[in-house]
Amino acid sequence: MDSQGRAVGVRRVDTLLSGDSPSTPELWPDGARQVIRRQRAFLVVSVVAVLLSVGGLVASTWVKSPAQRAAEQSPPPASVLSAVVQEKVMTSVVAVRGTVSAEGTVAVAPASSAASVGAVQVVTGLPKQVGAVVAAGDVVAEVSGRPVLALAGSIPAYRNLTPGTTGLDVAQLQSALIGLGFADRDVAGNFGSGTQKAVRDLYEARGYSPLTTTDLDAGTETSALLAAAASVRTGERAVRDATLTASGAAVEVAAAAKQHVVDAQQDLTDARSALSALRARIGVMLPLAEVVYVRTLPAVVGTVGAQVGTSLASATTAVLTIQTGQLLVHAMLSEGQQQLIAAGLTVSIADDVHARTAEASVASVGAFTTGAGLGGSSGANPAPAAITSAGAPATPGYPLVITPSVPLDSGWLGADVLIRVTTASTKDPVLVVPAIAVTGKADGASSVQVLRPDGSHQQVGVATGAIVDGEVQVTSTVPGALHVGDRVVTGE
């Protein structure tokens, strides 16, 4: 090698030793280029080997032997299902929804009455709103400026009570007036002057003037009075004339003349009696439209179906309803539930909205009903006030009535409540297992399979008792063979 070649080789070696890479491969030493080629070949071979290994592994997952495929498709080994034997008091409960309502409802209906004054009947006052207490003698509504009074009584108002009227409804009015402190000296059942005064005192104490029969029908009353008075005058004149004729009659006609006087006097007496009776029927009265009788007072306003200005000629609902008597809970049982419930069973009542509860008992379970017409009334012209049954839901089923152990206050009225009736209960805690764990035999005997710690099964004969919500009371036929905490087989 000449001196120039040796110089170039020296520079290449210096460059490699200094760590600087030459700018072109042609400047690398021959030995270095051979090493790099060998490294590249080794890297390619390694990558190919890795790829082949991965491919083989993936392919192996798709290749299975028949035995392996059969093993994978066979069901897993059976596992035993079991449940723990418990000890508790078993209680059977039937739960239904119900509504709190009163024993009865008195509806102040919109129908007008012939006793009402004026051609148009309009609600002019509603002093009582929903939930308000109604006491004896209270004004519950005002129609065309006239009051509707609440009085104690069980006979609904069905006619105008005027002077001279007699009957049980008059006696009821008299009793209500006496209960309010208004003296009535008339014979019970006879609307006389004493009853008139008591009615007048009641109205005036409430700020109203009582109506009279003259207010009701002045024209007819005046005509009748005038006719009766005319009959009296005619009778008086007939008696006078007959007396004069008899005094001047000859002996042979004296007897006939005297008889004529007697007849005239009798006619006069009858005319005077008729006039007196007519006057006795004139005076203060109690119109049908101005009274509503409530069996038990005080009571509570249940609903208000009108407002001031409502015309009764066009109204289709009651002006208001009065809930009377003890608050009860009404519900409807479906088919099958009525067989589990009997009068006297314990009941719990829960009002979820107001977070309150109460204890009660079953009062009655009624016969099946379609629910149609419950609490309704028939007839095209209902009376202004009618007593109806309340609370029973208008759905098919068996009506259930619940009586609270302690009377509920008026705040419960209308509440939608959950009723839980305890239909059966064991006196003491008993052993309980799922009903599915009990198997029966042809001879009627029953048993359970007890799962022992070593996995073995032991058949234990049992006597069954109460069944509640899928659980059954059991007692082992061999004392001590079944304990709390044992596991019984329920399936595999």
Image (spheres, grey):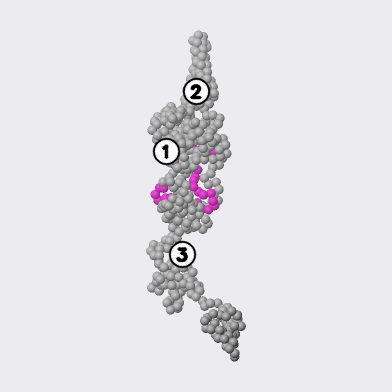
Earlier in the chain: of badge 2 and badge 1, it is: 1
Q: Secondary structure at mark 1?
A: loop
Q: Quadrant of residue 139?
A: top left
Res 282 visible: yes
Q: Secondary structure at mark 3?
A: strand
Q: CA distance from mark 2 to mark 3?
A: 81 Å
Between marks 1 and 3 in the image, the one whose residue lies nearer the viewer: 1
Estimate the x, y position of residue 333 in percent, counting from the top left.
50, 54
**Where does the magenta region start and end?**
382-408
Residue at 47% in and 26% down: 283
Give the crowd class for mark 1: few <14, some 14-19, many >=20 residues within 10 Å.
Answer: some
Give the crowd class for mark 2: few <14, some 14-19, many >=20 residues within 10 Å.
Answer: some
Residue sitting at the far front: 3
Q: What amino acid is labelled 1 in the image?
A: Ala
Res 35 visible: no
Report the residue marked by disc 1: 135
Marker disc for residue 286: none
Q: CA distance from mark 2 to mark 1?
A: 41 Å
Marker disc for residue 467: 3
Estimate the x, y position of residue 475 in percent, counting from the top left.
41, 69
Estimate the x, y position of residue 87 in percent, counting from the top left.
40, 67
Estimate the x, y position of residue 368 in percent, counting from the top left.
53, 52
Report the residue marked by disc 2: 274
Look at the numbered discs 2 and 1 and tell me whether their residues touch, using CB distance below 8 Å.
no
Residue sitting at the far bottom: 1
